[in-house]
Image (cartoon, rainbow, N blue to C red):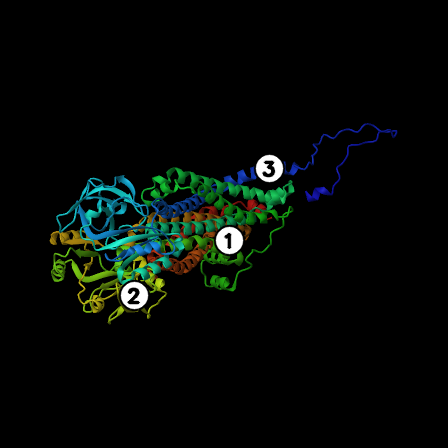
Amino acid sequence: MTALKGREPTSDVRLPPGGRDRPRRRSTRPTTRRGPLAGVAVGGAAGRRWAQSDLRTHRGEALFLVLATAGIVASLLLATALFGYATNPWQRIFTQARGAHVWIHTVPFADTRKLARLDGVESVAGPYRTESATVAVRGSRASVELRGVSRPPSVGRPLLTAGHWPDAAEPDGVVLESSLARALLAEPGDTLTLPGTARSLTVEGIADSAEPRYSPGEQPGLVWARPSAVRAPGGQVIGLRLGDPGDTDYAVQRAVTVLGAGAVGEVSTWQQARAAAQGDNRLLGQVLGLFGLGALIAAGFAVHGAIATRIRGHLRDLSVLKAIGFTPGQVVRVFLLQHLAYALLGSVAAAVLTEALGSRIPGRLGDAVGVWQGLPGHTLALLAVPVGAVLFIGLTTGLAAWRAGRVPPVPVPRPAAPAGGGLTGLARRALGLRLPAALVLGCHKACAGRGRSLATVARLTLPLLLIVVALSAWTTIDRFHSSPERVGMPTALTVRSDGALDASAVRALLLDDHRVTGAYPGVEVAALVPGQTGTIALRGVGTRTEPYPYTLAEGRTARGPDEAVAGQGLLDLLHARVGDWVRMTVGDRPQILHIVGRSIEPQNAGRVVTTSLDTLRQNDPGLSPAFYELRLRPGAEPQRVAAALASAGRGHLDVHPVDNPADGLSPLRGVVAGLIAVLALIGLVELLTAIGGSVREGERDLLALKAIGMSPRQITAITVTATSCTALAAALAGTALGLPLARRLIDAQGSSSGIGAGVAQSPSPALLLALGAAAVLGAAALAALPAARAARRRLADTLSAVT
């Protein structure tokens, strides 16, 4: 167009003889109308044809981009669903039940009526008399807290999901908290027995509660009963609903001061209940969100690289588009709209599939999607997440397409020399050593054009890095199952006695089973932290002659008197570290301990300090074991050993396996597998882009290679070697960067959850080697066919490509 603008149109006007003017004859050639929308019309039609032609040429790449976008958006939507599922159900129950922000367990004689007059206390629930007991139904047993409540309270009200509240005509009727009912498989109408007594209770209803849920061996189940059913009260409990939930710590401190530290047994707050209710769902949401965002960034870079490579390979075509009337903005819009269409198609497909089939996913993910679909912000999130993904991909596409708009309308001749320059000294020496020329030239080609090669390696490294992180998460979960003793669970069973057998008889009974290699007596009490703003678990397990096998991440084991090890959650709560002395209060007695080590503690959010039973007996010589932690021989099945011990105890022993926190993370394996598939698709798109660019860059060297006598097979090997070297460099970089990043991320998550750093496990060298080999061999296989086609091109086609 630039060359044509300076020429004037010719005219068919001729003067007749005699000089008289004759009418001008109209030209039969078509005239071009130059209206303001003429270029747009031409550009729109030609742009559609260009987009259609490009789609036919790159069908596989377009399909992979659509599938990768769909996987990314689906993972982000599932992460949003898990976050909503983790927070909103508990919040809904807490709001509907007018839950108490603080629950305080006290001794029976404490005057709890004073708490209603504290500043900031809006209303109270109770006080209610409580009794610790063990209930059994159909062979299942659980430790419970019987709470004497005559009628549903206005604060902390149980929300009935089945049955009804017992009336005066049903003195032994009770209502079970829903998590306890699920553990016992109990329904309204079932009869609960209290082992060791002649008493029985009838289940009249099941209710949801915003208080901490039942956890075997850690948190007793909650049972609401008539006051007459609480026959041996061991304490009382009162709930405080505050005007400002942010003043919870201050309210607890004031309450303990008013009642006296000796009168307070245990304190639980709404933050602890919410964290326990969220459980592993929030972690699953964080993992999905982290990998979804990482995959989205990787996909954006892959699209950017694909467009940049395509622009370098179609400079002449872009110049032709400019010459026929395309403006720079129209050229940019061709690329932008094309890839936005891919992103939009993938995002819409992900949103539709998640909405239609998400609730049918088995397990926790399906439950999360089902609950999320009924939440108020569901529609907004369903629109915002796909729109955000499309906009991000559009941004990266626009940055790359902007370069296409800058292509001049007159093609610029390609430089005579390749972008990487001549052979390096290393390459010439390698050829002098008679190494295969295809191998040497392929490695040289991968390293030539350093900026472009580094950008390709960086784009391919990102998905491989995320795959290494995902494999590390998978390996860490497997470690919890295969080697629980290395992640804070050296024992497999916890045994509690009903008191009918003395301590020596219980220990002898336990060690009589040949599958039990160690029985560590222990006791756990609630202790007030300094400042009296909450309670922690003070645990005395093992003796100095037979110490408990801690799993230490820092420091050493507790060997001497007053020495203890603590979990990460306790150290964070007390702002302490290994080597400090900490003071806590157990009842009305102070306990001062020297923290000599940090243990990996998966229970009670890490707010546990553990010492020997002998140390606790120094303050209370009459302290007897409340439970036994059992260590089993390798290969012994905890369920079978538990059944055998319960049978040997003739109903006097309550045996249950130690909870493994990885049990709640089982859905994470399927999530990790899906994310690896999405990241593999993104890596595949980047490989296809790199292969296409390498083939096009090699076209101008084709004549020279054939001139020196290289066969098509050797020329093909050059491109395959160059692509394989690029994949190998990306695999090495992804592994080198992914392993420390994965350890940091997993340890950071462990520290935030209270378990503590030191649980991260790297994938095995064989698995990492398999990942690298798959990347290199896959790259070589993908490059073989297009490289072979290019190597067999006719010389005339090659001449037209390089001119």
- Along the line of sight, which residue is nearer the eye, 562 or 289? 562
173 versus 535 height, above or below: above
Q: Residue 223: x percent and y percent?
A: 24, 47
Residue 338 seen in the figure: yes
- Along the line of sight, which residue is nearer the eye, 287 or 401? 287
- Give the number of the disc on residue 44: 3
Residue 556 seen in the figure: no
| Sequence-earlier tag: 2 or 1 | 2
| Sequence-earlier tag: 3 or 2 | 3
Q: CA distance from mark 2 to mark 1?
A: 85 Å
User: Which residue is the site of mark 2?
Assistant: 584
Q: Residue at image x 42%, y 38%? A: 352
Q: Residue 120: x percent and y percent?
A: 38, 55
Q: In the image, what residue type sits under mark 3?
A: Gly
Q: Residue 243: x percent and y percent?
A: 39, 52
- Give the number of the disc on residue 709: 1
Q: Nearer the viewer, mark 2 or mark 1?
A: 2
Q: CA distance from mark 3 to mark 2?
A: 77 Å
Q: Secondary structure at mark 1?
A: loop
Q: Nearer the viewer, mark 3 or mark 1?
A: 3
The furthest residue to the top: 23
